[in-house]
Amino acid sequence: MDQAETAFSAALTRLMAVRQLTQAQLAERIGVGQSAIAMLLKRRCRPQRRTLGKLAEALSVPVDELWPGFISLPDGEVVNVNSNQLGQEVPADVFVQS
């Protein structure tokens, strides 16, 4: 796994500790099994964007605190601010908040 997974796992571990959440408690909050949280923490898989959004919401943090470069749009969709679905750069004004 790469540096991004390592940073994600460290951030998730830290936030769970600060909020005194067990893997099982966090899993229940986001609607997955405890084993899914364990796999994320052990860097055995990358979270899907939807899961990133649920984790951020459950931990009361912005998505980019868990995985830099991703944000949650007003409709809840999690996107990479550096690219769109086709891998092209996204204009900066797309993410301007009113």
Image: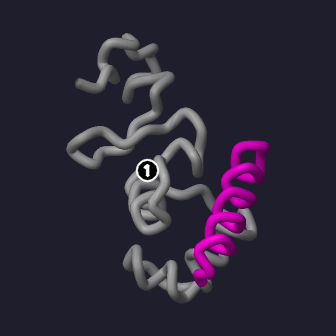
Residue at (34%, 23%) from the top-left corner?
A: 95
Q: Nearer the viewer, residue 34 or 72?
A: 72
Q: Amino acid at mark 1?
A: Arg
Q: Give the quarter of the figure containing the C terminus.
A: top left
Characterize the local packing of mark 1: few (<14), some (14-19) or many (20 or more) Cα atoms within 10 angstroms.
some
- Check disc 1 and report the residue beneath it: 49
Query: Measured from the top left, where is residue 62 in percent x and y?
Result: 47, 48
Is residue 21 placed above or below 1 in the rendered structure? below
Secondary structure found at label 1: helix
Residue at (29%, 26%) from the top-left corner?
A: 97
Query: Measured from the top left, where is residue 58 in percent x and y?
Result: 43, 68
Is residue 93 placed above or below 73 in the rendered structure? above
When asked about the image quadrant of residue 84, the answer is top left
Query: Measured from the top left, where is residue 3 in percent x and y?
Result: 78, 43
When asked about the image quadrant of residue 91, the answer is top left
Residue at (40%, 55%) from the top-left corner?
A: 53
Q: Nearer the viewer, residue 33 or 94?
A: 94
Is residue 75 placed above or below 84 in the rendered structure? below
Q: Is residue 8 magenta?
A: yes
In the displayed structure image, the side of residue 66 where residue 82 appears, left or right:
left
When asked about the image quadrant of residue 37, the answer is bottom right
Q: How many marks?
A: 1
Is residue 46 placed above or below 25 in the rendered structure? above
Stretch of the chain drawn in magenta: 1-21
Q: Is residue 54 magenta?
A: no
